[in-house]
Image (cartoon, rainbow, N blue to C red):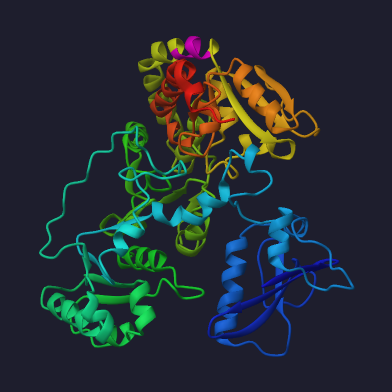
Amino acid sequence: MALVRRGDAVRMNVTYEGVAPLTIIISPAGSGPCLLETRHLSFRYEGTTITAQQERILRSIAGRLGDATFDEIAQKVPEEDQERGAVDPEEIVDRGVVTVEQWGAPDAWRRFVFRREFERNASSALRVTGRRVVTVSHGESECQYATPAIDARSMSLFCYPWIRPLAHVPNAPAPERSIPSFITTDMRDADIITGGAAKLDAVLDALADRTCEGDVVVVRSTCMPHVIGDDMQESVRRWSGRGDIIYDDVFAPAGRDLTAELLAAAIDSGKRRKRRGSSVALAGIAPGPALVELEGLLVEAGIDVVSALVPRIDLERARDWRRAAVQVLVPDPYRDALYESVFRPLPLETIEPPTPHGVADTRRWLEAIARSVGREAEMRRAWKRRMRRCAAERRRLRQDAAGVRLGFVVDADECAALGDPVKMAGVPVLGVVCEMGFGIDLMVYGDGPAPDDRPGVEIHRFDDRESLQRLMRDLPCGAIYSDLYCDARITAAGKMPFCLQLFEPGLEGAVRTAERLVGACRADFYRKYGTHGRTH
């Protein structure tokens, strides 16, 4: 495709295999007639007609841009050269004018925050579970090794915030099932040569006799069936089992949101259940100690938590969702589309208080929930009891935090993002660590205004690779933030990397977070041996 900006419009030429070329015109929202609008953008197409396939592509691009503003897009796209016309995208990459992170980008040496990678893989955090959810993957078994799950059991280049390698998350009791939760058809050479549809049919026929009402069978495509032309949809159409079956074409230009469909259907199936007065349903807190502790505080205040979903989506618990008097959505930039399609349309009172990270925001979050169900006094008493239990530990950790410092590397125009939960995957990092008492060394590229006047925050400027390396090596901070796993730039400077995986919500979660950060600052392994990995 090609990109070009003409005044207040960006023109995007799109080609996709099997679909006629399409020119999409993006302009500020409200600027005139359009096919669709997002919060800040208007989308239309060039020509008088558009096919269904082209419209799906346009809507997919609009969805991926999310809440982006026109200025954010326009500044990355060159103005049209009247003599040359549209700009070749490869030339844009050569200039470093790109809209996603890439290896070899001109600013890679100073890039420590990788939000595009988080956004691109955020769906891997969602886990649909239930007594009878079966996924049938049609393809060769080696495909499972080529695309490993992004979870705490596998290595990853990026420190995704939804992976908690340091947190003990007890496994839920294994549900009773007469069929496995995942099946692969395991195509072999003969299937690839002669066609694999018969193998898929055989698997589905074997499943059909073992399913019952309420079961969900998801048939998922992989590369090989697409390459050889297997008609998977026909196999799905001939399904004879008692459960539901869904074809999930992961290669569709604008694929369906299967997770949202399954979740919405499960919630809808429980709509006739009676609601309780002081009851809530929570969305957006991962299973683990923090969720147990927050639920416990609510129960102490007389508030019943009837369901807790996202990122783990238990279809059984989802059926209790409508029993709640209030639904609580924890702000998360990577879950907002799911909130918009599934939760916000429900006829329930909805509150979205700031994310419960750090002591102050956790208290505000709990008070907002208590206020919504009339249990404010009970919550104040429960909060005081819980604060007394961990007061000594908090005082000790605050004293420890006052003796160490944390480092952040950002561009001048990105400093404000450190305290913005929307920009930091739901965690207002700078506010949380300042509340805990840590000193902050902010290494800033560029000559923008001083980004923060919080006590304990010191600003250090750099303008090239050498000056950044010198700052990281010489500043007193013991740990430096990075989204890259074991960032060699930091370890070679003798410092310990830290990331969002160390942060937990809730009061006790804040205590554990502080303890991990203090430990990262005091760890001396890289201070002793980091120079052995330094490159010149």
Report the magenta residues as a range. 397-401
Asked where in the image residue 67 lies, by quadrant, the reply is bottom right
Picture mark count: 0
Q: Can the viewer see residue 37?
A: yes
Classify the position of the N terminus by image quarter.
bottom right
Using the image, determine if residue 30 lies above or below residue 388.
below
Q: Is residue 17 left or right of residue 4?
A: left
Furthest-right residue in view? 82
x and y percent of residue 343 in the render?
A: 46, 59
State yes or no: residue 399 in magenta: yes
Residue 22 painted magenta = no
| Left or right: residue 122 compared with residue 63 | left
Q: Position of residue 374 (x, y in %)?
A: 45, 39
Q: Quadrant of residue 428?
A: top right
Image quarter of residue 439: top right
- Rendering coords of residue 89 (x, y %): 69, 66
Q: Residue at x 66, y 26 (%)?
A: 442
Magenta stretch secondary structure, dominant: helix
Tell which of 280 and 58 is nearer to you: 58
Q: Position of residue 247 (x, y in %)?
A: 34, 77
* Rendered view: 149 above or below 509: below
Identity of the residue furthest to the front in this view: 536
Above or below for 297 versus 515: below
Can residue 273 be seen here? The reply is: no
Q: 232 and 307: which one is in front?
A: 232
The residue depicted at 74 percent of the width and 66 percent of the height is 29
| The C terminus lies in quadrant | top right
